[in-house]
């Protein structure tokens, strides 16, 4: 009986991690898709900035929707519906006839896939305080694997007859399968349905570090969307490939952090080291002239930036361990607010003073994780 129960728990964990991978894949594919689509649909920096900014609006909506839906119908039904609607929206991305339709489909995809991921992260959080940082980091390792595969698939698909649309058909099939297998793994919330928003108050112990996470993630979004544009404008044919070393670095950093967390290293120490890697890697990318050096800079930056969200989420949910769904949904809401404003400001600045100068905004946003690091010991 114990063996069967443990095997079921292991399978549920694997399915949760697969859900994380699907989320990372679909989000990472948007930026290189824009690079390929621009060959047919020319766009300005401000038009490109609409994508991450409106995706941020969808993250805000997803944070609100998931919290209310999980309170009313429970996590299992909410995750099933989110995965199914993610499949429908990625299909709309695949058949989009123009940039406006592509934008609408991408926003819908972000709403539903983020709702699905919120349920997955909540389920991983509720598996106990011990090992929480390791579980959340391993979950984002799987998201990193998906993020690494996504740009490669878009680039490869653009070289064959299916074009970039072919890759989105594959993603649609993946989400359709997840709609059937993921809800059982996510399970129900620890808090009774209907009480999720009343168990634990979210005070400044939650909101201060959560704000730091949101600012740092906004910096990551700007880097992911505009670094490919910088290389494409510099004459590199497949600018979307620049985020592949970034995601490789992100994967490496998260694997190291998961191992370090299992060895007893504190979240404060891991976040501080992550910030050091992020700033040094970005500086290399920003200042270097040679393409291989810029790729190396993106890899190093990914090692640090990739840990901002999982370690930060572990810190902020520690103050609301009995209300994981609420804590995660509010974190996504806050991240959405920051990522709504930051790319729009970034795009406007880039159009005025040039992309190279505007890139300085990215490390300033990443510095927000310092606030989370300083609260790490108090939160946990």
Image (cartoon, rainbow, N blue to C red):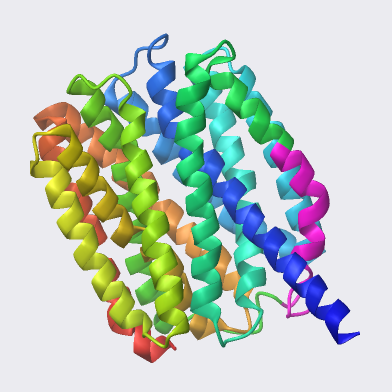
Range of the magenta residues?
174-195
Above-or-below relation of 147 to 32: below
The residue at the point 57 percent across, 10 percent down is 161
**What is the x, y in percent for residue 346?**
24, 39
**What is the x, y in percent for residue 114?**
58, 51
Is any part of residue 105 visible from this angle?
Answer: yes
Q: Which quadrant, please, contains the N terminus?
A: bottom right
Q: Which quadrant, please, contains the C terminus?
A: bottom left
Q: Quarter-wise, where is residue 242 in the image?
A: top left
Above-or-below relation of 241 to 148: above
Q: How many marks?
A: 0
Q: Is residue 369 magenta?
A: no
**What is the x, y in percent for residue 9?**
77, 74
Depth check, front residue: 311 or 67:
311
Q: Quarter-wise, where is residue 293 in the image?
A: top left
Is any part of residue 193 visible from this angle?
Answer: no
Depth check, front residue: 82 or 203:
82
Is residue 27 toward the left or the right of residue 182 in the image?
left
Depth check, front residue: 316 or 303:
303
**What is the x, y in percent for residue 307?**
38, 64
Above-or-below relation of 47 to 243: above
Q: Quarter-wise, where is residue 324 in the image?
A: bottom right
The residue at the point 55 percent across, 82 percent down is 131
Is residue 81 toward the left or the right of residue 121 in the image?
right
Is residue 295 toward the left or the right of residue 132 in the image?
left
Q: Is residue 187 magenta?
A: yes
The residue at the point 13 percent across, 43 percent down is 286
């Amino acid at each position: 009986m114990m063996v069967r129960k443990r095997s079921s728990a292991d399978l549920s964990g694997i399915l949760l991690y697969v859900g994380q991978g699907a989320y990372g894949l679909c989000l990472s594919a948007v930026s290189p898709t824009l690079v390929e689509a621009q060959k047919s649909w020319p766009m300005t920096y401000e038009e490109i900035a609409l994508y991450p900014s409106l995706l941020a609006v969808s993250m805000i909506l997803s944070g609100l929707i998931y919290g209310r839906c999980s309170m009313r119908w429970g996590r299992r039904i909410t995750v099933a519906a989110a995965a199914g609607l993610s499949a429908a929206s990625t299909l709309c991305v695949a058949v989009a006839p123009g940039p406006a339709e592509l934008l609408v489909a991408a926003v819908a995809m972000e709403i539903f896939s983020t709702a699905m991921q919120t349920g997955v992260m909540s389920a991983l959080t509720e598996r106990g305080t011990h090992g929480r940082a390791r579980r959340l980091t391993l979950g984002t390792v799987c998201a990193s694997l998906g993020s690494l595969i996504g740009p490669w698939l878009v680039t490869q698909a653009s070289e064959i007859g299916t074009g970039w649309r072919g890759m989105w058909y594959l993603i649609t099939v993946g989400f359709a399968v997840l709609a059937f297998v993921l809800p059982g793994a996510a399970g129900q919330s620890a808090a009774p349905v209907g009480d999720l928003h009343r168990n634990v108050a979210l005070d400044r112990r939650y909101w201060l570090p959560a704000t730091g996470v949101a600012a740092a993630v906004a910096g990551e979004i700007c880097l992911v969307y505009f670094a490919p544009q910088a290389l494409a404008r510099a004459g590199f044919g497949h600018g979307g490939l620049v985020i592949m070393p970034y995601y490789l670095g992100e994967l490496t950093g998260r694997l190291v952090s998961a191992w370090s967390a299992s060895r007893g290293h504190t979240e404060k120490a891991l976040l501080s080291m992550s910030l050091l890697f992020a700033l040094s890697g970005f500086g290399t990318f920003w200042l270097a002239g040679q393409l291989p050096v810029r790729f190396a800079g993106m890899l190093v930056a990914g090692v640090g930036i990739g840990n901002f969200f999982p370690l930060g989420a572990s810190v902020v949910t520690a103050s609301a361990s009995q209300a994981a769904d609420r804590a995660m949904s509010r974190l996504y809401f806050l991240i959405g607010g920051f990522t709504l404003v930051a790319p729009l400001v970034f795009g406007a600045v880039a159009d005025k003073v040039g992309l190279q100068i505007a890139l300085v905004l990215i490390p300033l946003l990443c510095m927000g994780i310092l606030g989370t690091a300083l609260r790490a010991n108090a939160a946990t």
